[in-house]
Structures are given as C-alpha cells and as structure tokens.
Image (cartoon, grey):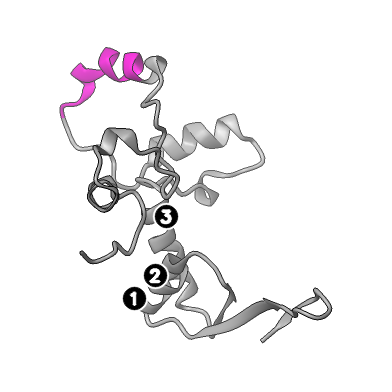
Amino acid sequence: MRRPIHGGNLAWAAALAGCSPSLILDFSASINPLGPPKSAIAAIESHLNDLIAYPDPNYYELKEVLSQLHPTLTADWILPGNGSAELLTWAARELSELEETYLITPAFSDYQRALKAFDAKIREYRLFVEADQGTTGQG
C-alpha cells in the first residue's frame, strides 16, 4: 500500500493499523475531530435559501466586509480561499514570479511541491543541528 503524499487520509491509516477510521485521532491535517460548531451549522441552515447562484469568485463583498472588521487591512490585502491548500497554491504562483524564492528546510513538503508546479527558482536554505555543539547552521 502506497503511503499518501498528504495527511488526512484516514482510510489509509486505518487499513495500515487494521482498525476502523473512527478509532483514529488524526493530527496529520488541520481537521477538527469535533466537527463544525453548532453556531456554524445554524448560520448555514438559516441562509440556505440564499444559495441560488455561485458565489462571487473574486470575493469582492466578503473582502470589503472583512476590511471593515479589520481597519488596518484594505480589501486588496485580503485573500479568502477554500482552505490552506488553495491559499498555498496562490502564494506559490505569486512567489514563482520572483527572481528566486528562498525556502527554509526541512519544511512542509507542499511548499516545495507548489513552488515547483509554477517553475519557481527555489534557493533552499537547509537548517541542521551540529551534534557536537548543538548549534544551528546552513547546510
């Protein structure tokens, strides 16, 4: 069985452990094991009738409201996304336009994968711990 590239794959972990996915507490992804709060479910249910069209893909209204709630940010500094993976993808796309992007490693592997997807020039800054002195340096 191939190991998944990303976390959050309970079916794979359960098969490996030989148990039900419900018996696994998964810390490999940012998923709330308690589920959504009741207040979030109530807010969604109370606005179901508003779901008659696709939402604005540019989030104009949402960004404007968020900028009013956070006055130090203008709407053009706010980037809503459908989870961290989407935001990471857009950040990598923007960073790929730079002459080069420094990436401190070891790090979350999706950083490098996303940058490579957009042909970014990556300069890796590898951190290591020297066993003798306990100092951190660049390798």
Dot 3 and dot 1 residues touching (CB under 8 Å): no
- Which residue ends up furthest to the front in the rendered image? 18
Q: Amino acid at mark 2?
A: Ala
Q: Earlier in the sequence, mark 3 or mark 2?
A: 3
Decide which of tag 3 and tag 1 comes sooner along the chain.
3
Residue 117, disc: 1
Residue 7 occupies which quadrant of the picture? Answer: bottom left
Residue drawn at x 42%, y 55% is 87
Name the spot of residue 16 as percent of width and height, x first.
27, 53
Residue positioned 80% across, 74% down in the render: 134
Quarter in which the N terminus is drawn: bottom left
- Identified by mark 1, the residue type is Ala
Q: Is residue 77 above or below residue 41?
A: below
In the picture of the structure, the residue carrying the numbered disc 3 is 87
x and y percentages locating residue 26 in the rendered image = 40, 42
Depth check, front residue: 67 or 44: 44
Assign the magenta stretch its main secondary structure: helix
Distance (Cα) linking label 2 and label 1: 5 Å
The one nearer the camera, 86 or 32, is: 32
| Residue 114 is a magenta residue | no
SS at circle 2 = helix
